[in-house]
């Protein structure tokens, strides 16, 4: 219900505003700007440190970010977080409350652009941090345990955009190649140690993607509709599978001198 | 073009609402659930070496019985019997919401009861604190200078301030009896918060090694357990800590911590010897089970599990049926003589 409501209003806003000419063009897909989005996300998780069942839930999601053109590099940073109440899929038992957040920092170099900058592509390095705290309520209705998963990773990243329909379609993503994972073997407690491990692509696979459409609403304000997806497959003695999807609507405030 | 755009957005929404499959759905056959329990215990339980149990052999013995079970009750009995082979009071199976946990019972659980709290209330306490003021404690005066506080359990959290209130009322006491007998344990952090009322400096009282990998001997390096001062009220006079064979788990942590303090004498019998820091796990059919995840040691490297914490002053077991509490009588003698 909430999803439909958000989508309907997002479309109305985006369609109602007349297309504004995209002014100055730059090699970076995003102008120097800050943005904030609110939306709905769906979290699917299966953490064997807790149990072997897949839990799923939806909840509100907040994203904030910034982009800057620094010399010849495009620097993009964003963070997103949300709270979810998860129930087991397939008739399982128990429930989970998850508080999670993700932060990305991408440093990209423009590598290709059409003559009029209608299409751009930048590639570079991305750093990502993920932190998830889970409170698992067991089927007995009495016991709860707390678990956590932390991942810090670096890997290749890209950002591409294509202007059309009076706005701009964009896609960005990053893939972790080398990670440090904090995934305690047993439930978190006052004495439980950190479970820090270094993980390469062979044991931690995943990626995050950000796809959307934005369109100028006024001279400095741009409306954004985006779909973000983040997946994680971590294999150790207690494997983790996680998939987060979110649909957000928000605004970007562009610095006047770099208005696009 | 606009239609295509709308179509794209609808596709986006549909994708966002899909139910991805990350792991295979749970199998609820007896064979699958037995294997799940056996495997998780193999991965999680911390004291195979302490208990000298060959878990592979245990699995081989019980698996055919589990598969032959004719009912959920019979199946639960097989699983419980298998877990009982670990001889660990912290290992249990709860076969369904609201069901009684099926747990191993130690020999000390079958000893005749040697403690009667009502005997103390009737015979020894001259003035009792209001139960409304300290609902989790039983406190009062044994003599004009000897206070008494009984802690029946460490269940729950957030009531450590009651001990401050009790110590406020007993502030004229020069000596204090802390009666831990028949305390089955509860919340580790609460136990240490309460113990922190009896010291003004941090004291290492033991260490633990926590299971941290798939092999049975994958355990952390020793992690020190530290008793830290806590609460607004401290009692640093002479403390007589009473223990018996039915002091378990977090109550043993409490006893072990106070045992290190120079102002504390432990009196009575050795504690039950059950320290495991259990975690709960789910079975596919909604049953839950608990497994120990650590090995706790005293400062002199003695495993607490199965050994307990021995008192400074051993008092042979008395009878709860008698008219006197032999342990408390001994404490009264010690207190009178300043011992």
Image: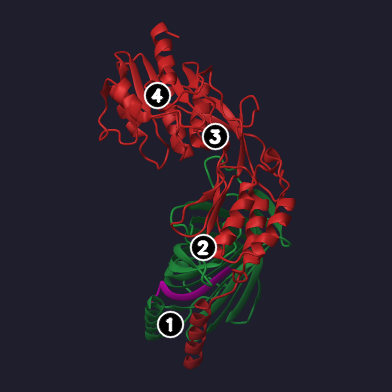
Mark 1 on the same chain as mark 3: no
* Residue behind mark 3: B108
Mark 1 on the same chain as mark 4: no
Compute the Cα span from label 1 to label 3: 82 Å
- The answer to whether mark 1 and mark 3 are in CB contact below 8 A is no
Camera-side residue: A212 or B29? B29
Mark 2 or 3, closer to the camera = 3
Circle number at residue B322: 4
* Residue behind mark 1: A20
Q: Where is residue A228 in the image (x, y as percent from the top left)?
A: 53, 71
Q: Is residue B166 magenta?
A: no
Mark 1 or 3, closer to the camera = 3
Magenta segment: A218-230
| Chain red in the figure, letter | B
* Residue behind mark 2: B286
Vertical comparison of A20 with B177: above or below: below
Compute the Cα span from label 1 to label 4: 94 Å
- Colour scheme in use: by chain
Vertical comparison of B333 with B242: above or below: above
Residue B195: quadrant of the picture: top left
Secondary structure that dominates the magenta span: strand
Compute the Cα span from label 4 to label 3: 20 Å
Mark 4 and mark 3 lie on one chain; the one further toward the N terminus is 3
Vertical comparison of A29 with B105: above or below: below
Q: Where is residue A180 in the image (x, y as percent from the top left)?
A: 65, 53
Mark 4 or 3, closer to the camera = 4
- Chain A in the picture: what colour? green
Circle number at residue B15: none
SS for dot 4: loop
């Amino acid at each position: 219900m909430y999803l439909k409501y958000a989508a309907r209003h997002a479309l109305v806003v985006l369609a109602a505003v007349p297309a504004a000419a995209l002014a100055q063009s730059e090699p970076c897909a995003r102008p120097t700007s800050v943005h904030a989005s609110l939306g709905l996300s769906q979290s699917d998780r299966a953490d064997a440190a807790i149990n072997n069942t897949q839990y799923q839930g939806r909840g509100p999601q907040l994203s904030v970010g910034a982009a800057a053109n620094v010399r010849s590099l495009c620097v993009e940073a964003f963070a997103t977080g949300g709270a979810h109440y998860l129930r087991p899929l397939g008739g399982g038992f128990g429930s989970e409350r998850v508080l999670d957040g993700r932060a990305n920092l991408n440093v990209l170099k423009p590598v290709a652009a059409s003559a009029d900058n209608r299409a751009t592509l930048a590639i570079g390095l991305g750093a990502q941090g993920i932190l998830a705290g889970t409170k698992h309520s067991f089927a007995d209705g009495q016991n709860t345990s707390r678990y956590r998963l932390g991942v810090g990773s670096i890997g290749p990243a890209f950002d591409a955009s294509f202007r059309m329909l009076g706005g701009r379609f964009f896609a960005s993503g990053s893939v972790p190649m080398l990670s440090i994972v904090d995934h305690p073997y047993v439930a978190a407690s006052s004495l439980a140690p950190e479970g820090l491990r270094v993980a390469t692509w062979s044991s931690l696979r995943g990626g995050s993607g950000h796809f959307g459409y934005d369109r100028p609403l006024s001279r400095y304000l741009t409306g954004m509709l985006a779909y973000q997806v983040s997946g994680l497959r971590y294999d150790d003695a207690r494997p983790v599978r996680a998939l987060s999807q979110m649909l957000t609507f928000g605004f970007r405030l562009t610095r006047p001198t770099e208005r696009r | 073009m606009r239609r295509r755009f709308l179509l794209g957005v609808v596709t986006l929404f549909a994708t966002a609402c899909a139910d991805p499959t990350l792991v295979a759905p749970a199998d609820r056959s007896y064979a699958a659930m037995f294997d799940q329990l056996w495997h998780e215990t193999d991965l999680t339980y911390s004291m195979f070496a302490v208990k000298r149990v060959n878990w592979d052999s245990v699995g081989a013995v019980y698996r055919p019985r589990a598969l032959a079970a004719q009912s959920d009750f019979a199946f639960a009995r097989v699983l419980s019997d298998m877990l009982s082979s670990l001889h660990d009071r912290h290992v249990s199976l709860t076969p369904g919401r609201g069901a009684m946990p099926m747990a191993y019972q130690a020999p000390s659980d079958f000893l005749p009861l040697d403690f009667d709290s009502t005997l103390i209330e009737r015979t020894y306490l001259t003035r009792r604190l209001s139960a409304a003021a300290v609902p989790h404690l039983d406190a009062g005066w044994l003599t004009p200078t000897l206070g008494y506080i009984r802690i029946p359990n460490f269940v729950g959290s957030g009531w450590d301030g009651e001990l401050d209130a009790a110590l406020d009322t007993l502030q004229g006491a020069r000596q204090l009896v802390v009666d831990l007998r028949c305390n089955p344990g509860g919340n580790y952090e609460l136990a240490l918060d309460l113990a922190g009322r009896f010291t003004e400096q941090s004291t290492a009282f033991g260490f633990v090694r926590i299971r941290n990998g798939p092999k049975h001997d994958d355990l952390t390096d020793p992690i020190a357990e530290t008793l830290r001062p806590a609460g607004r009220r401290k009692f640093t006079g002479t403390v007589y800590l009473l223990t018996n064979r039915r002091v378990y788990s977090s109550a043993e942590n409490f006893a072990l911590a106070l045992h290190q303090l120079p102002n504390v004498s432990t009196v009575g019998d050795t504690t039950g010897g059950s320290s495991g820091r259990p975690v709960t796990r789910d079975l596919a059919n909604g049953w839950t089970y608990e497994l120990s995840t650590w090995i706790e040691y005293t400062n002199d490297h003695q495993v607490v599990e199965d050994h307990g914490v021995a008192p400074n002053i051993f008092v042979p077991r008395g009878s709860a049926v008698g008219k006197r509490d032999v342990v408390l009588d001994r404490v009264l003698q010690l207190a009178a003589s300043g011992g």
